[in-house]
Image (spheres, rainbow, N blue to C red):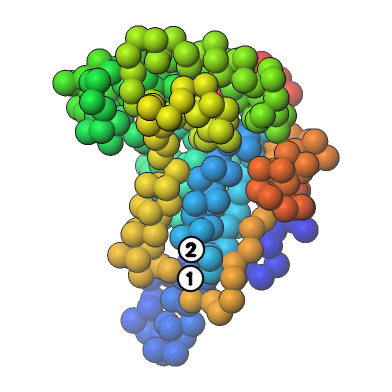
Amino acid sequence: MGSPAAIVFLPFDGHAGRMSSARRVEQLTIMNDAPIGVFDSGVGGLSVLREIRALLPSEELLYVADSAAAPYGDRSEAFIRQRVEVIGDFLTGLGVKMIVVACNTATAIGVELLRAKHSIPIVAMEPAVKPAAALSRSRIIGVLATSRTLASERFARLADAFGRDARVILQPCPGFVELVERGETDSPRAFDLVKQHVSPLVRQGADTLVLGCTHYPFLLPVIKEVVGPQVTVLDASLPVARRVQSILQSERLLAEREGPGTEHFWTSGDPQRVAPVIAKLWGRDVEVEPLSPQYSVPADTAGG
Ligand code: DGL
């Protein structure tokens, strides 16, 4: 299957005034029943997709795991921008009514570009620094994210706006994304790596941790085991899903189909390798399709 057969999207053509009202209603319904496109550097964005699914059972959800390019955190800004643009083109080509950038790194580097290029709503990630600052009693917050996210201007503005009266400790976590990409979320190696990156934050007095990468919620049971019950761990997947819901409501774009929506998965990596990992994290077997060559990671930029 190249694209979901059931999805038909007729864009508004500016001649609505001349259409019969029945035709207008039909177009509106098609727009409402258009899918939502969600993407990440790999499987991490499934942590956001599952919250969207839980809140919006009737929506058709398209998910792209850019696995051939993961981890974005190790890539140049130019490379990440290019991937964001290409995947945005792929999803809009399928007629999505909204794009969710389920990746903090892609948000930090590329969301403006996506918003400038497309007129549909674009929902993006924001590490939960604001709620963490409101919750922390010790006034010491640890933010776990990729180095790219932590070094971005976007993150600096967020930390400046909401982390003023708290000490915000920034913690890059090399290796976490790779663990989740392998579906290795509860191994002794995962425990050791989490301990190595997270324990120092608790030793420095952090009582609230922010998961600023969408892969990290899949390590939450291990993180909780390492930090213990006294430390609060926040991530932004549910708030982002709520934002998706509230925009669809206010734009009157909620799906109107009867019955549940389905999910469709693509990857720029090897579907044979990615499908079992998605199945493990998503909780059921899934079909994963390869992105066609025009949307794949070009071999000459593979190290970008
Ligand atoms: N899930 C991505 C994020 O939220 C992971 C980044 C990466 O691929 O390095 O930042």
Disc 2 under 8 Å from ligand 1? The reply is no
Rendering quarter of residue 161? top left
Q: Look at the numbered disc 1 and give the secondary structure of its residue.
A: loop
- The part of the image, by quadrant, that contains residue 203 is top left
Q: Quadrant of residue 192?
A: top right
Is the residue marked by circle 1 packed among few (<14), some (14-19), or many (20+) residues within 10 Å?
many
**x and y, in percent, of residue 223 in the image:** 52, 26
Q: Position of residue 289 (x, y in %)?
A: 76, 48
Q: Quadrant of the C terminus?
A: top right
Inter-mark Cα distance, 2 to 1: 9 Å
Amino acid type, label 2: Leu
The residue lying furthest to the left in this view is 165
Residue type pointed to by label 1:
Ala
Foreground residue among 304 and 238:
238
> Where residue 137 appears, x then y in whole percent?
23, 26
Task: Name the side, left or right, on which 11 lies relative to 274.
Answer: left
When the figure is inspected, residue 165 is found, relative to residue 134, above or below; the finding is above
Residue topped by disc 2: 56
Q: Which quadrant is the N terminus positioned in?
A: bottom right
Q: Residue at x 26, y 27 (%)?
A: 136
The disc placed on residue 41 is none
**According to the image, label 1 marks what residue?**
255
Task: Check if mark 2's residue and mark 1's residue have beta carbons within 8 Å.
Answer: yes
* Residue 98 in view, yes or no: yes
Q: What residue appears at the point 34 percent right and 58 percent down from the top-left corner?
A: 247
2 or 1: mark nearer the eye: 2
As drawn, the residue found furthest toward the front would be 229
256 lies above or below 151: below
Q: Residue 59, position in %: x, y?
A: 53, 65
